[in-house]
Image: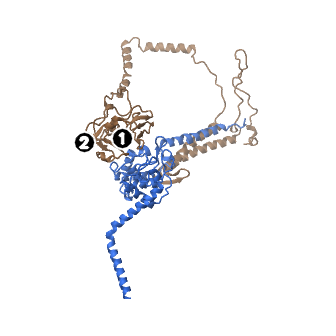
Chain colours: A brown, B blue
Amino acid sequence: MSSHDIPEENLPAEQDTAHGAVTVADEENPFADPGLPPHEHRVQDIDEQAARRSERTVAMLFTVSMLATLGFIASYVTIPTDKSIFVFPIGHLSAMNFALGLTLGVALFAIGAGAVHWARTLMSDMEIADERHPIEASPEVKTKVLADFKQGAKESQLGRRKLIRNTMFGALALFPLSGVMLLRDLGPLPGTKLRHTLWSKGKLLVNMNTNEPLRPSDVAVGSLTFAKPEGLEENNEDFQTEIAKAALMIVRLQPDNIKDKRELEWSHQGIVAFSKICTHVGCPISLYEQQTHHVLCPCHQSTFDLSDGARVIFGPAGHALPQLRIGVNADGYLEALGDFEEPVGPAFWERG
Amino acid sequence: MAALVVLLIALTLSGGLYAAFAPADKAQADDTAQSLAIEEGKKLYQVGCASCHGTGGQGSSDGPSLVGVGAAAVDFQVGTGRMPAATSQGPQVTKKKNIYSQAQIDQLAAYISSLGAGPAVPTTNDYSPEGADIAKGGELFRTNCAQCHNFTGKGGALTHGKFAPSLDGVAPKHIYEAMQTGPQNMPSFPDTTLSQQNKKDIIAYLNAVNGDQTDNPGGLELGGLGPVSEGLFAWIFGLGALIVLAVWVAARTAKAKKS
């Protein structure tokens, strides 16, 4: 906009000079305060036509928002959920999702854009200096408040009626105890729950995929199998609680490749069974590399060497994966020879 | 003339007799075809594989023994172009363009399975989605495969530069063979622990979440890796656009006189 189409009567008579608290430097105030810079007018302040244009722009944005909201409702009602469209560069997507997102976004954006344009072009933009004042109340106000308080205390008879005062203090003091009592829900302490799993002597190792007990011949060298204790079914009420501790990862190594003596003793013909729960923070861990015999935890990259007692070879885990001692029962099925000898999963305060 | 007629009759008779009795010898003919395939496969093996896996498939310091790996392993490794591998390998052998015809792969497979019994190449019926339970397949995939290959088979990182490849666009036959044989660092999932029906279910699940016909209501799946790529996109492009807009609004003065 050039200045020639601004009507003469709307031009400011002269540019404002500096305003606000202007001081010059003296002995008490070594720094001069130049005050605020002179106020500059916007086009809309001096040209009524420009102001009307701004008004129309803001109103248009708000109207767009209204239309978009109506569009949102209309898309929700009319577009079938399974309709798919192609939108560049997003590709194929649900028409309804796209319409809902677009209309909702436009509706919100237009409200914001209208408000910003309104504030920038039409609302007053005069800079105002607000001088500080002391926070302390005046002596008269202070005297009055103190007098009012004393009178109120006297009239309430709190000092005279000791029974009321004491019982009130008692009530107020006891009330927070109800909040403290809720903390009891943090307990009771887990006791030995963290130290024991469902595994015990004679429990069969049941394949998670087929729900059938495993035989040694089922487990090939280089294979990976997940097992649960016999008797634990997915529709059991406590399935999640129990499988979180009892989940088992079964791999078979060449017995010659097992470096750890105890691991070899606890295995059956090279079949070893380790807890599937990472000893760092308890993620299910089974990224097994069958050539290196390493198991990687996807959460924090703790790496365990299954050929060497599941020793930690990398990452933040603090303990080796607990191994389950296994053998074969009279019917030729793999069975546990007891529970894990140490707590499975992450360390805890009393683990020792 | 009579001699010629007799000869013709004799020829017709013997041809007819041969035609009548030949089907009885079909098994023998099959055996011959089989040994022919083994013979051809051996020749291909000597050219393409023997330098690493040894002249008799016994393995060397450059490649493992192939005795007992079975036809399925050959079909997977050669069919996906992983074998023959380059002489110097990175952390793992990756898939590349396959240079053998299916007939040649079958001959190689016949030769390798003649060295020692192993899993056979699955039939179309083994991995076709008919009769598969997709929901059960999803459950099995999350139990056995998702830890490395991600929830919808988009792949993921392992240790020391190794990785689990994306299963998007991998032929169902090759997925089946990979489960059966456990190529490279992937553990195997033999039929004894993951039944044939289980494998069929898993393949049907992958086809349902990754196939050509899969609906993607969100569009722009950003690799399908979940919150990491989505969050990165939102932080960089979403917040970036908002910052650019804020700077643009603030940089434009509303004053009539530019100063």
Whole-percent x, y for residue B146 in the image? 41, 45
Q: Are marks 2 and 1 in contact (CB under 8 Å)?
A: no
Q: Is residue A294 left or right of residue B229?
A: left
Whole-percent x, y for residue A11 in the image? 74, 37
Instruction: Indicate the amino acid at tag 1.
Output: Asp
Q: Is residue B10 above or below residue A267?
A: below
Whole-percent x, y for residue A190 in the image? 33, 29
Residue drawn at x 58%, y 15% as measured from the top left:
A138
**Residue sitting nearer the eye, A27 or A68:** A27
Whole-percent x, y for residue A184 in the image? 35, 26
Q: Are marks 2 and 1 on the same chain?
A: yes
Instruction: Indicate the amino acid at tag 2.
Output: Asn
**Residue sitting nearer the eye, B69 or B248:** B69
Residue A38 seen in render? yes
Mark 2 → mark 1, Cα distance in angstroms: 24 Å
Q: Name the residue that disc number 2 marks.
A: A329
**Residue sitting nearer the eye, A286 or A136:** A286
Q: Name the residue that disc number 1 marks.
A: A256
Q: Chain of mark 1?
A: A
